[in-house]
Image (spheres, rainbow, N blue to C red):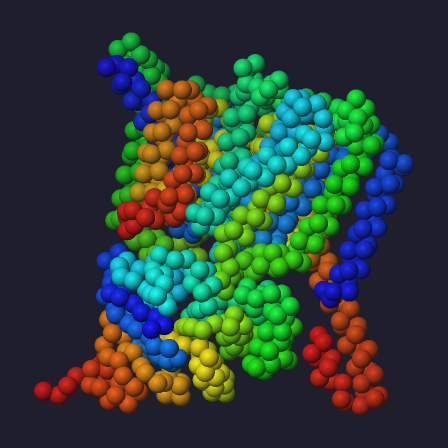
Amino acid sequence: MKRSQETNALILIGIIGLVTLFGVPLTLDLYSVISLTTAVSLAILALSLGLIWGFGGILCFGQTVFFGIGGYAYAIAALNLGGSAIAIIVAVLVAAAAAVFLGYFMFYGRLSDVYLAVITLTVTLILYSVIRRTSGPEYKIGIAKIGGFNGINVPPINYPWDVNKFLYPEDFFYVAMVALLVTYFLCVWLTKTHFGRVSESIRENEVRTELLGYDVRIYKLCMFTIGGAIAGLAGTMFANSIGRITPDVFNLYNAALTIIWVIIGGRGTLIGPVLGALIFFYITSLLGQQNVVNINLFLGLVLIIFVLVVPKGIVPSLVQIWVRRRSRRLTTHSARRMRRRGRSRVTEVAVEE
Amino acid sequence: MDLFASLGLQIIYGIANLVLISIGLAVIFGMMRVINLAHGEFLMLGGYTVIVSTNNGVNIWVAMFILAPLIVGIIGLIVEWTLIRFLYGRMVDTLLATWGLSLFFIGLITTIFGAQTETTIAPPFGPIFIGEYSSSGYELFLIVITILLVILLYLLLRYTKLGLLARGTMQSAEMAAALGISTQRIYSTTFGIGAALSGFAGGLLAPVTGVLPTIGAVYIGKAFITVISGGTAILAGTSSASFLLGGINGIVSFVVGPTMGEVALLLFAIVLLRLMPRGITGHFFKRSL
Amino acid sequence: MVLETRALSMHFGGVVAVDRVDFSLRENELRCLIGPNGAGKSTFFKCLSAQLRPTAGDVVIRDFNVTESETHQVARMGVGIKTQVPNVFDGLDVEENIWLSASQSTSIKRARVITSEVIERLQLGSVRKAQLGALAHGQRQLVELGMVLAGEPWLVILDEPTAGMTQDEVVRTAEIIQEINKSATMIVVEHDMQFIRMIAQKVTVFHQGRILIEGDMDEVSSDERVREVYLGHRRPQ
């Protein structure tokens, strides 16, 4: 995609984002707004994996680790400290710290690909297993009981400047949507920095990146930490939209979903996973309300079909089709012009393709 | 003394359990480097085969030793033929596609049998008594079966033509092909055998665990980790990893509790992988079966 | 002494790939490493680039003992490395590939300048926006050479730089290598004898993990042992 086309696409995304931001609370009913808020938080989670996997080449099967840690840390901090804004910051930092710890362990041990996937999956399973069994009153941090499989009820979110004033669900939608938009554009910017370019080269060929003199371990660690922080942020938004955080966030199903969003939406783009999550959320809500087709059956088939037929995902495939059609049109048009004006343009067009 | 015997039996059963649930996955991984995330569902299908057929009058031994491996083996062949063979070499895509397959099977069984447990069946052996402690006779039976199974597989790999072809293909598929061996046929057969082994294991374990459409999730984590920790040698890898991980699980479970036992197993596996990224048999016992 | 190895050994289980090799390289030399398949040249190369950690012995680059170092540390010292199998970024275009190399060692602005220079020098202008994955093998090797150059190295080690190249590309590569040699010390591991003749000053012959003989091209090619090792001729009794 040429640079100008890309800028146009980004502007379009920005406009749609702003329209959604202001339009949704005005046009949709309360239930839909709350539903959409949850969808937005999942989209941020998808974005985090889209960044580290699509651009960094880090296949993390357990992005839910940081999502859940973010959610839990938020709940615990909010209950103990009272202020939501500071709780969000604490939660993101805790999730990032967890990512540093796990990432250091894996990348400095030069673990790759499949083994990385296994370990991160294992960690999310461990967390699911352990936290589920913390039902007793003795399991608590500060005044917050961890609550086992029932989870923690999250206190209502309040304003940063006035902890006694609470946000309505519609107001919280603004917060979540702004978080999504800001995080998205920050990620886009990140991929254009030197750091982003090197991370991309690591994805393409780790050996060569290292041969050029880059310490790939630290680049992967930083990318992984950023992904963990974003997933943690998503967790805080999620906890607020649902009103509680339970160990289910760590389970195998949700870990799988995160991967599915990125595959379906398109690995290698940032908007793809976001759209993938939103579309999927919509479809699964619809399916959840009916009994004809079992949801697992459906998800399984979708995943299989996508891997076999559309391995790049929706967005990149659409982009490819669009780009191809445009250049074909260009060639036929230019060819006719060429025939009328002489043959000197042939090489130029060939190179432009 | 009796306590030790009873405890020892518990721990050995834990190890045998890990071997049983992992061996099918190990065969497939060892041969084709395919990580089949639908493995848990193969176990689940074996369990359903046994329970449904037994509840409908079939003799339990026939169900366990013949029906379960046969049916799941055939399912495995179909899966290989329609899905896996297009994805060889694409490790990540295989992971994802088999994950999809796993969801598919769960959905399918839920649709057919409903989300609740089928009526379970009682284990065919009663308790045995070691002094004051009663242990499950069935567990002892499973230990014996597991040992026999490992021996049988060893003999198969070492002394039969199929075993030799399999070992050759595992070491160098290109060379095997150059010698005229149809590697595709070896892969298909291996996948079928791996599935059959999983079905067999799932059927054997059905009286112990019962079956739910989602029971595969219980198995997949541990099986996955055991196979990766073991490395690519099918028997040596699975045995050594099961021994270590099962042992840790058993001991910690006894000292602290079953939850911590599980956690200990998972944590130990992570450390093991960090120290030996290619699994145990990637670093030790490299030439073993 | 730009590079030295002392009693360098590399064992893989029971196989001794490199056997107590003492090697030294002077400033501005262009040294060729040759030898039959399995002689240990590439393994030796990987010990120099820190892609393998030697079982025993030392690798010293400009008085720094790099035996225990990581590859990126060696590269950062100013060593340009080109591996036997082309290691390039297939999903990125030629310009991006070279830019990534340049930007590692200098500022972003200067990196752009270097990238343009390298592309011009190697006559890659017509494919500068082409995806690496779509280029022919010989061109990819050339781009990889460009990546090595873009790092402005003072020591360049190349493992079979002409593998898969057409005759024209081989000649061009020989010219490029001789030009690089004006500002950098070089080690070239190669098979193609014609190519070696185009560029060789001093030649080191490897055989079964050890250095068989070192000398200039004439000395080496007239040596009986070298003939035997390469061609399997037996001395008439």
Q: Residue at x 46, y 42 (%)?
A: A105
Q: Nearer the viewer, residue C146 or B25?
A: C146
Q: Examine the rendered structure and indicate whether residue C79 appears above or below residue B64.
A: below
Q: Examine the rendered structure and indicate whether residue C48 appears above or below residue B160.
A: below
Q: Nearer the viewer, residue A137 or C103?
A: C103
Residue C70 % position (x, y): 41, 57
- Left or right of A167? Residue B213 is left
Residue C188 seen by the camera: no
Report the label total: 0
Q: Residue at x 79, y 29 (%)?
A: A161
Residue B207 % position (x, y): 44, 23
Residue B68 % position (x, y): 44, 34
Q: Residue at x 27, y 39 (%)?
A: B151
Q: Residue furthest left?
A: C237
Q: Residue furthest right?
A: A26
Q: Residue furthest front?
A: C63
Residue A39 % position (x, y): 74, 37
Q: Quadrant of the N terminus of chain B?
A: top left
Q: Examine the rendered structure and indicate whether residue C188 appears above or below residue B13.
A: below
